[in-house]
């Protein structure tokens, strides 16, 4: 049996896990992300935390497969990494991790590692290919085919959040385009669809007395049978379903996995999206299952470990 | 140097080529496709034609890499093939080809083999990944990543023609859905966009005196500066550009290749599509080149040979 470290680097904390190669998580912990000094202390902080953990165990060095890491940015083939929110531009992440730990290190973008995690041990376990769509502040994505991540020629493989989905949109997306999937099918998008609906219709709704309209409030109201919330959810799910159908008709993964904060809405979301997905998907793909991600915030850690295998 | 046969099976003719492994086409010929008796004579017809060609050359049997074939349908992992237009349902294509020729045989769908051909020796030569979009009677597609075709879990990888692109469409596509890319960006779609525009606007246009409105007539009028035709081309290219942006944001190939009858419009089509593509594509992909396919009707033959390598 071999072991490895899976690391998920975020803007505020670094999640770290010691795994067995069979997918069992033996231990996990977190350290703070030190964004001072252009984030240049982060690699050594992570490396020293791993070194300290290695001392707790009696494994031989050959028993370790290495250190996998997911970053909120890009890891290039020379081992340097870019991450705008950490202040990184071609920071030598992989060489530094290797030099501090003495172990092999590999890295990838965090959306891709999350997809790899769900593929290895999560909602996509047992399937040969999957697309993970994370419905958070934005919409992220990662596509795995035959155990490999579709990186893309410009690292834009799986950029599902920026599928041009609504030709008539006038508002501008964070990316600068108009009508991206993320403008509707994210937590932010869900809240905005709700605000729009509250302004457009004068039907009564529990959302009107809600102190803060967010995705959770919308889906709680959906579960309570609120008519206006159902209308919002219909629109949200229709956009999302068209996005999923696009992924199915292009890559045709064996399973579509929904993760991120909005996916906590659970079964009602899956049921509404699946019904609408079947309208838009190509015949051969109409029965592709749409399932919930199951690793939550640990997906990146799992995926980083999977990238060592 | 090794040799191989690349075969492109169509509904009326079978195109056959003898290739060197370096991509040089040594000879090509055609035989009729015998669709009588549920198409059951086709494999032996092809096999015997190859046998006859082998007798003309002095190569040893070990010099042959085999026979590759592209079919208007699916080839399954057991070597059987389905092709509705030929009357095939689980016809043992690959075993029969192998038994008649004594050579190894491999097969794939014709859209995928065309993509593989353009990747190997055509418009995508020198790139690591590509998407081929064929603008013919319908819109077909094939996606190659790292030399391998994205087949998909249900063989729907690259089904770009059925991307749900227009949520407001009321007319039904051949596939049963509404608003598929193929309803606009095919030769048929182009002609229909023109008919719609002629009915909607009363501006003068050379298209009004055209005995038959087809994609060629539209693009000839575009080149002559006809205002109404330009309006049609704008719509056609906008839909196509959104489809290409979707492929780019999902798979992010290094190059986008346009083939099929409508692509004969040439540079004016490429220029108009590229301009609109840049509006919809994600930032990282805005400079992905859009180029013309270069193998024409030979793409399938080339791709079938490439599948032997």
Image: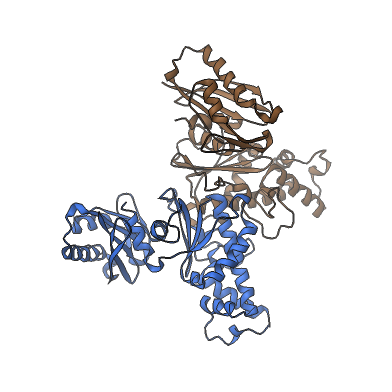
Chain colours: A brown, B blue
- Which quadrant, please, contains the N terminus of chain B? bottom left
Please state the horizontal and vertical placement of residue A132, each as a whole percent of the image: 55, 41
Can the viewer see residue B165 in this picture? no
- In front: B151, or B177? B151
Please state the horizontal and vertical placement of residue B224, each as a whole percent of the image: 59, 80
The residue sitting at 23% across, 66% down in the picture is B45
On screen, residue B45 versus residue A16, left or right, reads: left
Q: Image quadrant of residue B90?
A: bottom left
Please state the horizontal and vertical placement of residue B177, each as a whole percent of the image: 54, 61
Q: In this view, does A306 lie above or below A162?
A: above
- In front: B177, or A222? B177
Q: In this view, does A78 lie above or below B30?
A: above
Q: Is residue B27 above or below residue B250?
A: below
The residue sitting at 60% across, 72% down in the picture is B233
Q: Image quadrant of residue A38?
A: top right
Q: In this view, does B95 lie above or below B11?
A: above
Can the viewer see residue B245 in this picture? yes
Please state the horizontal and vertical placement of residue A44, each as a whole percent of the image: 60, 23
- In front: A57, or B190? A57
On screen, residue B296 versus residue A177, left or right, reads: left
The residue sitting at 66% across, 85% down in the picture is B204
């Amino acid at each position: 049996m071999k072991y490895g470290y899976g690391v998920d680097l975020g803007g505020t904390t670094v999640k770290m896990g010691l795994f067995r190669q069979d997918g069992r998580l033996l231990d996990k912990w977190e350290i703070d992300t030190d964004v001072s000094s252009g984030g240049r202390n982060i690699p050594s902080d992570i490396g020293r935390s791993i070194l300290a953990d290695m001392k707790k165990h009696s494994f031989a060095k050959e028993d370790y497969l290495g250190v996998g890491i997911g970053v909120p940015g890009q890891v290039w083939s020379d081992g340097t990494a870019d991450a705008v929110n950490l202040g990184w531009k071609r920071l030598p992440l992989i060489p530094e991790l290797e030099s501090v730990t003495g172990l092999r290190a590999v890295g990838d973008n965090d959306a891709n590692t999350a997809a790899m995690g769900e593929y290895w041990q999560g909602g996509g376990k047992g399937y040969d290919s999957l697309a993970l769509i994370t419905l958070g502040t934005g919409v992220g994505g990662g596509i795995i085919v035959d155990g490999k991540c579709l990186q893309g020629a410009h690292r834009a493989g799986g950029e599902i959040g920026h599928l041009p989905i609504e030709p008539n949109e006038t508002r501008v997306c964070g990316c600068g385009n108009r009508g991206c999937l993320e403008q509707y099918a994210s937590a932010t998008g869900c809240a905005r669809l709700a605000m729009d609906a509250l302004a457009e219709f004068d039907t009564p709704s529990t959302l009107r007395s809600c102190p803060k309209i967010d995705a959770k409030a919308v889906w709680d109201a959906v579960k309570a049978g609120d008519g206006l919330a159902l209308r919002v959810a219909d629109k949200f799910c229709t956009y999302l379903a068209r996005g999923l159908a696009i992924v199915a008709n292009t890559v045709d993964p064996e399973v579509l996995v929904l993760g991120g904060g909005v996916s906590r809405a659970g079964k009602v979301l899956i049921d509404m999206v699946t019904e609408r997905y079947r309208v838009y998907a190509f015949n051969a793909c109409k029965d592709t299952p749409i399932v919930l991600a199951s690793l939550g915030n640990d997906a990146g850690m799992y995926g980083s470990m999977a990238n060592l295998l």
